[in-house]
Image (spheres, rainbow, N blue to C red):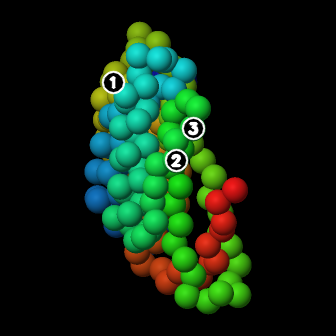
Amino acid sequence: MNTGHDTEPTADAGYGQALPGREALADLSEWVGIASVSSDPDRADDVRRSARWLADTLHRAGCPRAELWGTEGLPAVYGCRPATDPDAPVLLVYSHHDVHAVDPSEWQITPPFSPLRDGERLYGRGASDAKGRSCATSGPWPRTRPSARSPRRP
């Protein structure tokens, strides 16, 4: 059944056991509540707020370099955690923090930017793509030692 929701389980549902579940879910719920629809000019401030939220969260997760990069349009987010081993491989995560436009009338359970937890699922626009995946990727950083070289900015 298509409920109009991103319905994949969030990180606290057993994926990425290193994540502090309640904290990660609270963070993700907060971020899903930001209507970061980049294709809607009226939502440009929300997209900027989403970018700032992500940079701040990366910094709190142990990424000493988390920045907003200005572009011709809306900001990009860059985070870097330098390695302790200069010969270590580089881990690169590439994603987005904006979401596609949505017709709220197609959402039957909750409005798209009003996150709702139902058991091990979090419903809300971006809960699984890509905000949920970004939280799952950045969440384990405080529990791991840096082991990748810092990529250079193009």
Amino acid type shown at disc 2: Trp
**34 sits left or right of 6 in the view:** left
- The one nearer the camera, 67 or 139, is 67
Residue 110's label in the rendered image is: 1
Residue at 54% over, 77% down: 82
Task: Name the quarter where the C terminus is drawn.
Answer: bottom right
**145 sits left or right of 27 in the view:** right
Question: Can see residue 122?
Answer: no
Amino acid type shown at disc 3: Thr
Residue 71's label in the rendered image is: 3
- Give the CA separation, mark 1 to mark 2: 33 Å
Check contact, mark 1 vs mark 2: CB within 8 A.
Answer: no
Kindly state the secondary structure of the residue where label 3 is placed: loop
Residue 69's label in the rendered image is: 2
- Residue 115, image quadrant: top left
Task: Name the quarter where the N terminus is drawn.
Answer: top right
Amino acid type shown at disc 1: Thr
Residue 109 picture location, percent across and down: 35, 23
